[in-house]
Amino acid sequence: MRILLVSDAWAPQVNGVVRTLQQVKSECEALGHRVDVVSPEQFRTMPCPTYPEIRLAVRPGREIGRRIDAVRPDSVHIATEGPLGIAARRQCLRRRLPFTTSYHTRFPEYVHARFPVPLALGYAWMRWFHRPSAAVMVATRSIRRDLEGRGFANVADWSRGVDTELFRPDRPPALDLPRPVHLYVGRLAVEKNLEAFLAMPLRSGSKLVVGGGPQLRALRAQYPEVHFAGAKFGEDLARHYASGDVFVFPSLTDTFGLVLLEALACGLPVAAYPVPGPLDVLGDSGCGVLDRDLARAAERALEIPRARCRAYALTFSWRRCAEQFLGNLHPVGSPLDSIETPRAAAE
């Protein structure tokens, strides 16, 4: 198939959405498909408000229309709800082309954390965006149930994978910090609830934070006793995972948490809140402790055998993730019952 993938999240951004899309693109191409990507670096951009590291495309509509006409895709997937996603949605509706979407991020909660926008309004907008999608792909059953309860239709499962060759327990550690090392990896942004981890009391050991983001400078100044390593990639990132003893995941809003799989693949047990994301990833594996008291969860998680965490991570595959993605696509020429009229697209 010729697949057109439209995403406001792409390199040089560093996050779970980008890693997922890049891995799926690679796996689809290995299976013989062609994947053309429309991403922000192909357009004039402006910085995202409150998050200048993310660039947003400016007035991309006509160019996306030209790309659709040039590629003549067999399937179109709109991965994000940003300017590129909105423009691609409009162009597909005008051309009566079926398309699929994915729900990677709890944008209503993220916007609500930064601005006084009611959650109900945020979800109303998200329903509008995803309504004409032939399939709204989500990473976990909890998120699927949540969206269906909020009136979303055509929700489809799309799990995740992990590179178990890169992330493994036998890597030499990058740092020698006082044990046990409580590790966080991810963006340093308000929606990650990172201060719940940074302020968490420890009986012993240290805290290690790996990642960049808009809060890095302020948090580094506020918590001088915490080791902030900055953003890391590839083998360097894997060696920082190997420096930890327990992985602490304070987020309350992540739809999955790809870093959970990376930590498990490195043999790290997980401490997290009992919320969607950790609940779905860990299930009944016994590889983590979910507790409203994050410090208590971390202390108990240290007792979990590392070999159990590694064995569980080996059950996740990027190939299976790509196959699920391909199975959810809606080929051009399929029935258009769920596609809105051109007039509805303009509303």
Image (cartoon, rainbow, N blue to C red):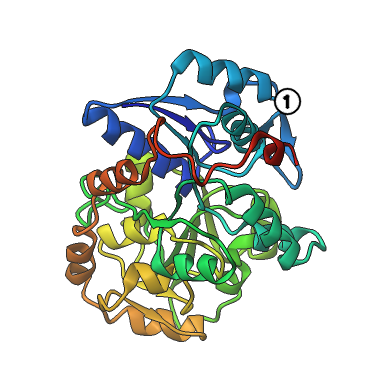
Question: What's the residue type where badge 1 is placed?
Answer: Arg
| Residue at 64 percent of width and 65 percent of height | 223
Query: Residue 218 sits in which quadrant?
Result: bottom right
Q: Which residue lies furthest to the top in this view?
A: 70
Query: Which residue carries the number 1 mark?
Result: 59
> From where the camera sits, is residue 13 visible?
yes
Q: Give 302 or 311, whichever is nearer the viewer.
A: 311
Query: Residue 114 sits in which quadrant?
Result: bottom right
Residue 132, how many percent across, how many down?
Answer: 56, 46
Left/right placement of residue 42 relative to residue 124 reads: left
Residue 40, how many percent across, how many down?
Answer: 60, 28
> What is the quadrant of the C terminus in the image?
top right
Crowding at dot 1, Cα within 10 Å, few <14 / some 14-19 / many 20+, comes out as: some
Query: Residue 58 sits in which quadrant?
Result: top right
| Residue at 56 percent of width and 43 percent of height | 80
> What is the quadrant of the N terminus in the image?
top left
